[in-house]
Image: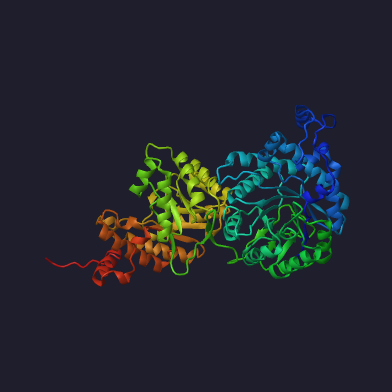
Amino acid sequence: MSERVVIYDGATGTQFQAAGLTADDFVLDPSKLTGKLKETAERLNGTSLEGCNELLVATRPDVVEAVHDSYYAAGSDLGETITFGTTSIVLAEYDIPELVYDLSVLSAQIARKSADKFSTKDKPRFVVGGVGPGTKLISLGQATWKEMESTYCDAYTGLIVGGSDALLVETTQDLLMVKAAIVSANRAMAETGKTLPLFVQVTMEQTGTMLLGSEIGAALNMIESFPSVTAFGLNCATGPVEMAQHVRFLGQNSTRPIAVQPNAGLPMMEKGKAVYKLTPEELVHHHTVFVEQYGVAMAGGCCGTTPAHIKALSEALGGHKHTAPAHWIKKRNLYSGFNFANDSVEKMEGKNLVGCSSLYQFQPYHQDSSMLIVGEKTNANGSKAFRDLLATENWEGLTELARELEGEGSHVLDVCAAYVGRNEERDMQHLLSHYNRHITVPIMIDSTEANVIEVALQTLGGKPIVNSINFEDGEERTKKALDLCSKYGAAIVALTIDEEGMAKPAKKKMEIVDRIIAKTREAGIADHDVFIDCLTFTLGSGDEEFRESAIETIEAIRLLKEKYPMVNSILGVSNVSFGLKPALRQVLNSTFLHYAREAGLTSAIVHFSKILPDTKIDTEVWKIASDLVYNRRVFTNA
C-alpha cells in the first residue's frame, strides 16, 4: 500500500511576533463587522485586546492570511486555523467569550482562502481546524465537562461551517479534556451533517508524561477506543530528541496514522526571550528517522519552527513513502487525493493496546502470570466499610480504601455508589472525581442507571469499564449503556441474564452470549472490550437447584473462549460461597476460581488477598471443595 508523508505547517505565534503588530491591531472596529462581532466591538468601544492572537482573524485578516500563505508557499500540505485559544474559557480572559463560533468561522474561511490559492491538481492544500487545551483542566476541577463540551462544540461547528477539511485538538495535557474534545467534535459533525477526519495530539513533558502524569500508553489506549479519531500524535513542549521514545512507542503500538510536530528544540533564554535553535536541517534529520523507522505519516513543527523549517521538510520528505508499520488504512487511502471524508481505520489484529486505562496508566486485560484482578471493596453492595464511609461522605477515607486495593495488587477497581436513600449520580461523580486524580489503576463503573454511567464517564480520564448490562428488562437499557460506551470510549461487562431471568445451564448462557455479542458489535464495541459474566451461584445453600451451577458456569466459560476467543470472561467469585462462614468461603472461592481459570476465565471481581493457591490449602480440604464444585457426592446406606 502506497502512502505518502503529509507536511504540517509550523509555529504561527512566531510569525505574528515577526509581523510587528501593535496594540491597535487588536481592536475590533464595529464599522467593518456585522452581527455578534459588531455588537462586541461596540461594547468594547475601542479597547485593545493585545495578546489575543485569535482576534486577529477579525482585526487583521490580512496578516493571518499572510502567515498561512508563508507556510503553504514553503510546501505544507496542512494549514492549521488560528483558533488555538478559541474557547469561551480562554476568550473570557479577554471578556469576549461569546465570540467562539464567529471567530472559528472567520479563521477557517481565511485559511480556506489561502489553501485554495496554493492548491494545484498535483498538490492540493488542506485546512485543519485546530483547538488547543485552554487554560483550565477538568481533572483538576477548574472546569466542568458541560462547559468544556459546549465551548468545543461551538468552536468545531464554526470550523466546519467555515470550510475546514479536518478537525484537530492539540497540545493537550489532560486526558479527560481530550475526551471532552473528541465527544464535542463528534457532536459538531453530527449536528452539521459533515463527517471530517479528527486528529488528536498530546503533549509529553520533559518528565516523560503529560502534565498531569499520564503515560503515553494511557493516552493511546484511550484514543484507540474512539473510531472517529483518524490520526494520533504529539506536539509541543519538547524538541524531536525528547519526543523520540514516545514516537517509537506509537510506531510500535498505534493503529492510527502518527502525527509529530516538535518544537525547534528546547527553548533557551537569551536577553529575556525564549530562543529555539534547532535548524531546519536538524529537524529534517529527526523527522526522517521518525518517518523511515516508526512510520510517522504527518510531519511538521510547533514552537520556534518557521517557514524555512517547513520548506526543508517539504523538500526532503514531501511525498516520501513511509514504512507505516503501525497502521493500515482500508476503503480509501487517506493520503491518496486527500479525500478525508468517510475514511476509516482498520486495526491490525494484536497490534493495538488491548486493555483499559486510568488518567495515568494503561492496564492490559491479559496478565502474563495472573488474570485481571478487579478489586471489590469499593462497592456499596459488598463492603460495609465502603458503605459506612460513603454514609458520612468521608471522601478521603474512601480514597484510602481504594489505595489499599491498589496496594494489594488489584488491576482495576469496581466502584458502586448505589446506596438506599442517597443520590447515586451525585455520589458517583464526587467519588470518581477523587479517584480520577488520586488512583492510578483504571475504574470499573458499577451501575445499571444510564444517568449514573454517563456522569461517571464524564468524570474519568482514560478508558474505564462499565459494569454492567443484561436483558432482564429487554433491550432498551442495554442499548443506552452501549451507546454511552461507544460515545465516551469504554469497555462493557454483560451478564447472562435475559427476560426469563438468570441463565443456569451453559447452553442457555451461550444463547444469551450470542445475543450480547450481536448487540456490542452493532454498537461498534470491539470484542476485546467485552467482558461476559457467566454468573456464579452459591453452593453454600445446599439447594438441589444449584448443585451443578458451578459446573455449568465453568463449561460456559470454556464455550465462550472457544467461540469468541477475543471476548473476555469475568466472575464475581465470592457469590459461589455466599452463606458460608469466612474460613470456608476463602477455601471455596479459591478452589472455584482455580477451575474457572483453567477453563479460560480472564478476569474476576475478587478480594484477591483472600484467594489462596492450591498449594496453600490442605489436600483433603481441597478435595472436599473440589467435590462440591463438581457436585461429586458419595452416597452410603445407613
Q: Is residue 433 visible?
A: yes
Depth order, front residue of 142/622: 142
Side of 621 where 447 appears, left or right: right
The image position of residue 3, as x and y in percent, is: 75, 65
Q: Quadrant of the C terminus?
A: bottom left
Q: Against 255, is 53 above or below?
A: above
Side of 117 where 86 appears, left or right: left
Depth order, front residue of 253/201: 201
Side of 553 where 466 appears, left or right: right
Q: Quadrant of the N terminus?
A: bottom right
* Residue lying farthest to the front in this orientation: 271
The image position of residue 443, as x and y in percent, is: 48, 53
Q: Against 197, is 528 above or below?
A: below
- How many numbered callouts? 0
Q: Residue at x 30, y 64 (%)?
A: 629
The image position of residue 151, as x and y in percent, is: 66, 39
Depth order, front residue of 420/383: 383
